[in-house]
Image (cartoon, coloured by chain):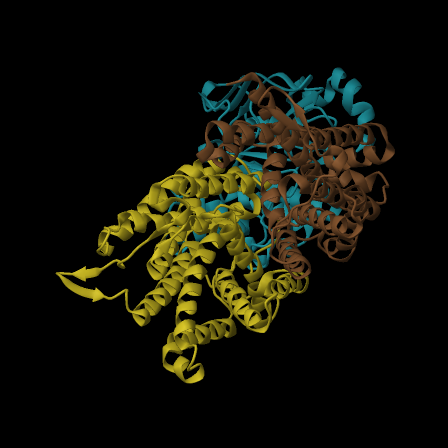
Amino acid sequence: MSAARPIVDRLPRRLLVVLLILVALLALYPAYGPLLFPAKHGFLLQRLTGIMIVAVMAMSLDLLVGVAGLVSLGHAAFFGLGGYMLALLSPAYEGANLWLALPLTVLGVAAAAVVVGFLSIRTSGIYFIMVTLAFGQMGYYFFNDSRVAGGSDGAYIYVKPTVELFGKTLIDLDDKLTFYYVALGVLVGTYLLLRMLLASPFGRVVRAIGVNEHRVRGLGFNPVLYKLVAFTIGGSLAGLSGFLAATQYGFVNPAMLSWHQSGQVLVMVILGGMGTLFGPALGAFILEFARLGFESITDHYLLLMGGLIIGVVLVLPRGVGGWLLTVTEHRPADPDQEAP
Amino acid sequence: MDLWILLIQVLNGVQYGLLLFLVASGLTLIFGIMGIINLAHGSFYMLGAYLAYWLAASTGSLTLSVLLSLPIAAAVGYVIEALLVRTLYRRDHLDQVLLTYGLILIFNEAQRMLWGNDVHSVTIPPVLAWSLKLSDTLSYPVYRLFLSAVCGLLAIAMYFVITRTRFGMWVRAGAANRDMVAALGINVKLLFGVVFAVGAALAGLAGALSSPVSSVYPGMGDSVLIICFVVVVIGGVGSIKGAFLGALLIGLADTFGKVFMPNFASFVVYGVMAAVLLWKPRGLFA
Amino acid sequence: MTTPNTAAAAPTLSEDAAAVVLETRGLTRNFGGLVAVNAVSLRFLSGQTHAVIGPNGAGKSTLVNLLTGHLPVTRGEILFKGRTITNLPAHRVSQLGIGRSYQKTNIFPAFSCFENCRLAAQSRLSTSMRFVRPALAYHTVNEKAQAALEACGLARHRDRAAGTISYGEQRQLEIGMVLATDPQLLVLDEPLAGMGVEESEMLIGLLKRLASRYTVILVEHDMDAVFSLADVLTVMVNGTVLESGPVDMVRASQAVQDAYLGDGEEAY
């Protein structure tokens, strides 16, 4: 992973404008959606919610792949674990208490990520990819083959988690529109959180590790520690994403943990532009929209998906995000980037 | 456990392992020499199986169709290398992953368009469609023995090619040190093209040969791909010897896992891999 | 022109325990059957510039890697200020105050020159496990980075990507990064490697300034540079120490003349 990825502390203004417009389009969708797509509005609202949740996972994977240079092919394990935690924490016929279920889920997934990370970080390169794949598949088969939460059939979450304060319902997650905004909030929040992390001393070390781990150690940092913390943060955010997905669909199954899921999200990250954070989120939207569009044209939409992916690789070496950064930058070598 | 049953399981495990080796050897060489993580490698396995099924149905001879599927898979591999993969040698590994992921989608969809979603079975040629009687109640299908024998012979042939021929020397040089290939004045383009095509052909052959045993179904390439990556990584990337031992290890682990822990067989395979990598982070023979 | 450093006379080479910064005792490193560094026992004194020279394959780079924790030791001991640091990992060695530069330029090309130094300076925070405040808001770190950048003569390239400055400047940055880590001892691994004549002169000037402020271990091929910089000279051949002592003494040594200096210079 030697691709030179500069530190982008501040996005180019024009790019910022583009991103803000996109967020505004999402935020206003419930207003214009029914007018533009009267027949499909409800369906699209759900799909958008789902995409935003996956985008959170894509950004969390970007922290590992694009920033720390840890190419994980087992990231879906944490996504799925987050979902299963909610399923297991939900009483049979009532909603789980979000104030309890969410922290427990994130902590549980974080604990799993610490263990998996501790064991995997000893390896590097393709070996790291494969070890994370192995742990992911072990997670998959654990839920698939055991009787925990329905085995291969998966499990239903009949009642969504409740968000109450002093006995009053604060947020009704069962309401599709409310949940849409919750997902949007988490998407934007995750982006800002990761931006903050990347700008922090911690983030600078992790980014340097992604470029040249050896040199970072020579400077006096213990890379193992930083990689482990990054891995844990990424895993926890994937768990949060899985928690939301389980809430949305009211259902969890082992496929959530499978390598297919990991692979798809990895594609979002690479196609979207590794290390740019906003890119992988865009990647999620691009891939899912492309799928929606192609599905409506032909049964054989995978052919078009494959073609799209290959086309992007050939044409945009740094992914969509990298391309956007280049075209919106004022001038290629503008020295007034980092203010003192 | 009955001794005969044990023997049968060992034979099954070895047969599965040898088959995995055919696919994994190409995968490990392509990564070792070209530095390409070829996710589309499993698609050649699927291609071989479907070609065998399709050609056997139209020509009536499985032998002929297996022999035909070999050059076809090689040709498809060569063309893909020349048209697409070649443009990415200087790029990040992950770009290649993405490209070959796109190829998987196209292969899978092309398969659906050409041959549909059904599961097909392929008939064993009459010469091999009988069983060896082991005891009063147990017997072993001859086709599986034949399969092991073919794969075993190929493994031996590969060993000779790699250790005794000039081409094999290039391959060894490339797997040991990628930069050395160019330094030795070898025609790198040709070497890469041939390695990719041979890898594709071996994977295709494995698919064609195994079609009567495992049936032919959509997505069959994906599961083989993942298990072959496991094999490659256990053996150490770029090592043929490692791929061979890794394949046998996984073949046996999977077979016996299914016998002793029917509910957690797949768990066993990945557990073995995790254990090996925690013990030797770069595989057994890197 | 080779003008031996007359200032070398300043420390009288009385090896008080207090003045010994770094010491190796029987330091040995094997690679398979090859003994790259063989029973090397050396003392590096405070304030001095101690050069290690020797032909290719003499074990100089291995020695640097052993001293800085980049390679595990096969046998022997390394003491830093009297305490053993044998087989400490590289990051711990760095934290103790041993800063090293690399023979092969080892910078972060996509980062600005300032960020390269800033990251190095950041390593001296008690911990970098800080997640909220932006890294650029740590002013002491910024100041240290700026000072290092100025010390290595790259202030004018502050915001340029390190990969876009000239090779010689990258070598300077390499040293700037070491300086930003507040080292007590500098271990410089062939700082002049691959540089042109003009670039070399620049860097030798920089090294002279460093030599007057720091304890330096200098591994170098360039003899002129070594003689103009070093107080103490160690000659290594085949992993062992052939001769070690004040520069003039070592230069005069017949063994060194025979084995190395006499006929070796044109080989470089």
Give the residue at the far left of this rendering.
Answer: A166
Residue sitting nearer the eye, B137 or A269: B137
On screen, A50 above or below B186? below
Q: Name the spot of residue B128 as percent of width and height, x first.
A: 74, 33
On screen, A296 above or below B39? below
Q: Residue at x 47, y 71 (%)?
A: A19
* Residue C5 visible in the displayed image: no
Q: Residue at x 73, y 30 (%)?
A: B146
Q: Name the spot of residue C207 as percent of width and height, x first.
A: 61, 40
Q: Residue at x 45, y 43 (%)?
A: A140
- The tint of chain B in the picture is brown
Give the residue at the far front of this rendering.
Answer: B136
Image quarter of residue B170: top right
Image quarter of residue C171: top right
Number of labels in the image equals 0
Q: Name the spot of residue B171 as percent of width and height, x first.
A: 78, 36
The chain assigned the colour yellow in the figure is A
Q: Name the spot of residue B15 as percent of width and height, x first.
A: 65, 30
On screen, A230 above or below C88? below
* The C terminus of chain B - image quarter: top right
Q: Residue at x 67, y 59 (%)?
A: B110
Q: Is residue A205 left or right of residue B132?
A: left
Residue sitting nearer the eye, C55 or A245: A245
On screen, A50 above or below B166? below
Q: Is residue B275 left or right of residue B146?
A: left
Q: Is residue A50 left or right of residue A326?
A: left
Residue sitting nearer the eye, B141 or C221: B141
Residue sitting nearer the eye, B128 or C193: B128
* Residue B273 visible in the displayed image: yes
- The tint of chain C in the picture is cyan
Give the residue at the far bottom of this rendering.
Answer: A35
